[in-house]
Image: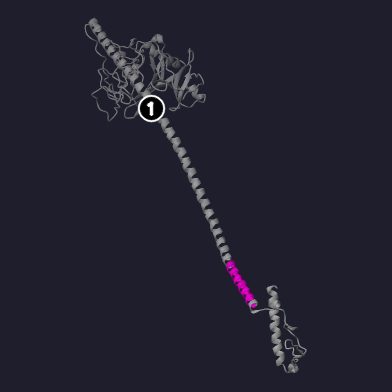
Amino acid sequence: MRPGTWSIFILFCLSFWGNSQALTKNPILSRIRRAPEANGEGKKCSYTFLVPEQKITGPICAARGYSTDKDRVTRLDVASVRDLLSKQRREMETLKLVVDVDGNLVNEMKLLRKESRNMNSRVTQLYMQLLHEIIRKRDNSLELAQLETRILNATSESLRLASRYRELEAKYSALSAVVNNQSVLIGALEERCMQVYSRRHEQSPMGPPLVQVVPENIPVNVPRFTNEIQRDNTRGFARERGSRSGPSPTSGTLEVQKPPQRNFSAEGPFRDCLEAQEGGHSTSGMYLIRPDESERPVQVWCEQDIDNGGWAVIQSRRDGSVNFFRNWDNYKSGFGNIDGEYWLGLEGIYNLGRQGDYKLLVELEDWMGKKVYAQYSSFHLEPESEGYRLRLGTYQGNAGDSLSSHNGKQFTTLDRDKDAFSGNCAHFHKGGWWYNSCGQANLNGVWYTGGVYRSKFQDGIFWADYGGGFYSMKSVRMLIRPID
């Protein structure tokens, strides 16, 4: 029998027992009597109930006799049922506690998931920052590696250049020794020549008269004399007075050296620098110039930045890098570097000047940085048959007129004496020029540093009316241009 059936049965019996007690107490039912025992049969009884009409709400138990022992409900059964119910109640309470605990666990799990998501987001952010930092450091490492590579390359290049420089120093030392030996030999030859000349004329020739002109303009803050011959300290070697760079005065004809390819126009050739300017070339630089009736073009530095431009530079002195103590053939054909120190050449100057009316501009700069000029209204040379005789016009400027005394004079070099002095002015002044006897200007002389120099003869680059005969200019340029 199931536990539920036992519960219904117990309730039915209890209800029946309660109702029977109530019936015995009810006056209406007091007439109900117990049937007497018949025939001594005390084991059985029967009851007759008169029940009034009323609504019965509970179970009614009718005893029909004793049930068998196997159907009897004992106290043990009731106790077992009660124990079962208590056990089930405890299990239900346990389940309820488990459910409450599970609910708390669920909430905690939700909180943990939320915190986990936040933690994952933070970890992702930190990971991205770390990745960015790693990438940045890697880039820095690459840049550092590239910089180190460039430094190594520059170091190796500097070492290579240092090695080449040492080689050049060795070669230069050897060349300097050769030049010094040649200078000694030249000095000895000069002494022998002087001795031979003195034997022929019974007395040695005196040097040319010194410049007696008192210059109107004297550079200020300049020592009157130095103890030693001036040297160019900016160069790698000292230049003694009369020392020579390049071929000796008796060497063969030299062509103008090819200049570096910068500020160079390949167009042309032009008639002169003014024609180049009129053709749209307004930048100063090297141009091919071929004067009328000239056999071949020559390279000329055209100055387009002063006095409306169109000036052809025929002579330039600036640093003493080129030796100007040369022979006739050198001065005729030209020598030097077009973008540095050079002499255009007597033949080239003659061909330019005979194309029309030209004027001459002489630019002078002293060692204080002051610049002065002398301009002559006309300029041209006569042909070689006339010794490239100089023809000048009137003077204007602020440097003083030191060239008019050379007007009408032929050009003199060491091997071709055309001056009015008894000796050779080119020998005493160490350059080629339109010497008179010998003259007030020597722009092709020795380049001394510092201005005032000490020498037996006035052989520096001097302009007598500016500084006197013993003041050597820092830079000089001679330029010609067609007359407007």
In the image, is residue 28 above or below residue 284? below
Residue 263 lies, in percent from the top left, at 46, 25
Instruction: Read off the magenta span.
Output: 78-99
Regarding mark 1 in the picture, which secondary structure is present there?
helix
In the image, is residue 291 above or below residue 99? above
Is residue 420 highlighted in magenta?
A: no
Q: Quadrant of residue 96?
A: bottom right
What's the residue at 51%, 49% (across, down)? Answer: 127
Q: Main secondary structure of the magenta part?
A: helix
Disc 1 residue crowd, few under 14, some 14–19, many 20+, Cα 10 Å: few
In the image, is residue 37 above or below residue 294? below
Residue 254 lies, in percent from the top left, at 40, 13
In the image, is residue 2 above or below residue 253? below
Q: Quadrant of residue 73?
A: bottom right
Instruction: Work out which quarter of the rendered image holds the N terminus and state it.
Output: bottom right
Residue 282 lies, in percent from the top left, at 48, 27
Residue 70 visible in this rendered orientation of the protein: yes
**Farthest top residue?**
200
In depth, the one of 455 and 172 nearer the eye is 172
Question: Is residue 320 toward the left or the right of residue 28 in the image?
Answer: left
Residue 46 lies, in percent from the top left, at 75, 88
Is residue 90 highlighted in magenta?
A: yes
Question: Is residue 264 toward the left or the right of residue 200 in the image?
Answer: right
Q: How is the image coloured?
A: one colour
Q: Which residue is mark 1?
A: 159
Q: Name the amino acid, label 1.
A: Leu
Q: Quadrant of residue 12?
A: bottom right
- Mark count: 1
